[in-house]
Image (cartoon, rainbow, N blue to C red):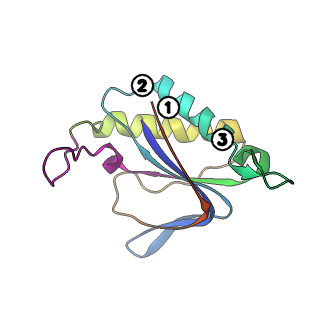
Amino acid sequence: MKLVIQRVTEAAVAIEGREVARIGRGLMVLCGVADGDTPAQAIKLAAKTAGLRIFNDANGVMNRSVTDTGGDILVVSQFTLLADARKGNRPSYVHAAGHELATRLYELYVAELERLTGRKVPTGVFGADMAVSLVNDGPVTIILDL
């Protein structure tokens, strides 16, 4: 799995002009599932996401997690994170998981985030063509993969 995690002041997802999810201060997570990824990886990455200390404490030091701050998390599936563009100019997606595995691990990741944070985690719509908007705070962007 590969995640792009951005600290945001707000983020939203729309499909065909209709907003389907919105959050305030927290994390915007793009989630790509690779062929061969496992449930253990999804659970481990959820724990890492919930525990990442990338929010400022009272001294202005990044020492607090989204869980500590009570922030929101928005998760959007994005198979293009698994693109291989080493050869030629047209990326290959052969390493991206098939629909069944990708859906199952994406949903497990979201469910585990909800369990760990005690909060509902809004999402985009798996496999849909989405318009994602966000205001990156910092900017702070972290890439995690297993």
Q: Residues within 10 Å of mark 2 (few under 14, many from 20)?
A: some
Question: For residue 72, which quarter of the picture?
Answer: bottom right
Which residue sits at x=68%, y=61%?
25
Q: Which residues are magenta?
A: 75-93
What residue sits right under mark 1 in the picture? 42
Going by the image, does 122 lie left or right of 92? right
Q: Nearer the viewer, residue 124 or 51?
A: 51
Disc 1 to disc 2: CB gap under 8 Å: yes
Q: N-terminal of the two: label 3 or label 1?
A: 1
Q: N-terminal of the two: label 2 or label 3?
A: 2
Location of the C terminus (image quadrant)? top left
Q: Amino acid at mark 3?
A: Leu
Q: Nearer the viewer, residue 127 or 8?
A: 8
- SS assignment at label 3: loop
> Does residue 140 lie above or below 83 as drawn?
below
Q: Residues within 10 Å of mark 1 (few under 14, many from 20)?
A: many
What residue sits right under mark 3 in the picture? 52
Location of the N terminus (image quadrant)? top left
Question: For residue 138, which quarter of the picture?
Answer: bottom right
What residue sits right under mark 2 in the picture? 38
What percent of the width, then of the height, locates residue 142?
Answer: 54, 47
Which residue sits at x=68%, y=38%?
51
> Does residue 6 lie above or below 20 as drawn?
above
Q: Amino acid at mark 2?
A: Thr
